[in-house]
Amino acid sequence: MKLNNRGFTMIELLSSIVIGVIVSYSTYAYISYVANATTQLKLSRVANDNVQAIVESIRFNLSMYQVSFETNVLKEDALLAADKLPYGLSNGNMIPRAQCKSDGCQAYFGYVIIPSLFVRNLYQVDIKIALPKQNTLANKWKEDEWKKYTYFITVK
């Protein structure tokens, strides 16, 4: 008897298709994860660069900024409330939050400058910045998406 061994069986074809679909899906999931992580990293880098620029600007031009002499933590939290942050980041530029409606902002931020009670010319700068998550459909901010930076600067 002679057997015909040419070609593949239906089960072999289906199993290879299933394996191909699984590999394709896992590759797609990994690529989308890397794309989201890259976007978040870019936003975080822009935010950190802007935070450093704000701190250096404050350090060298403290007389241009309003300094809060309130050392109450509740007052500081009220000034840095989500709906009261006065600035936005749009394409790496700092703009007033009111302009975010027309220009679109990737993040919002605000800061409070508090002088030290014990050391002359030492100031604490608390900066709060929001980085949105890319997978949210609504443009709402959650508390875990906020980052708070604290710097101590000295001035002449």
Image (cartoon, helix red, strand yellow):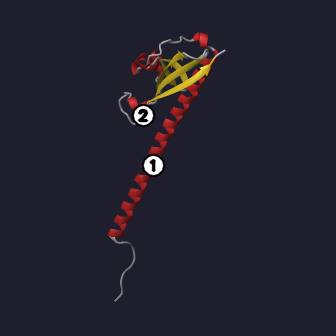
Q: What's the residue at 51%, 22% (across, down)?
A: 126
Question: Which quadrant does the C terminus fall into?
Answer: top right
- Where does the image place residue 113, in percent across and percent down from the top left? 53, 17
- Disc 1 residue crowd, few under 14, some 14–19, many 20+, Cα 10 Å: few
Looking at the image, is mark 1 or mark 2 earlier in the sequence?
A: 1
Q: Is residue 1 above or below residue 100?
A: below
Select label 1 or label 2 by which is in front: 2
Q: Nearer the viewer, residue 73 or 99?
A: 73
- The residue tagged with tag 2: helix, strand or loop? loop
| Residue 133 marker | 2
Q: Residue at x 54, y 20 (%)?
A: 124
Q: For numbered disc 1, what is the local secondary structure?
A: helix
Query: In the figure, residue 49 lies in which quadrant?
Result: top right
- For badge 1, the amino acid type reads Tyr
Q: Amino acid at mark 2?
A: Lys
Between 147 and 46, the residue placed more toward the observer is 147
Q: From this viewpoint, which residue is outermost toward the bottom?
A: 1
Residue 130 at what x, y percent from top left?
45, 27
Residue bearing the label numbered 1: 30
On the image, the x and y values in percent for residue 35 come to 48, 42
Q: Is residue 128 above or below residue 42?
A: above
Q: Is residue 34 above or below residue 117?
A: below
Q: Which residue is nearer to you in this view: 109 or 15?
A: 109
Total tally of numbered discs in the picture:
2
Give the percent coordinates (x, y) of residue 33. 45, 44
Return the residue nearer the eye: 69 or 8. Answer: 69
Residue 82 marker: none
The CA span between labels 1 and 2 is: 17 Å
Position of the N terminus, as image quadrant, is bottom left
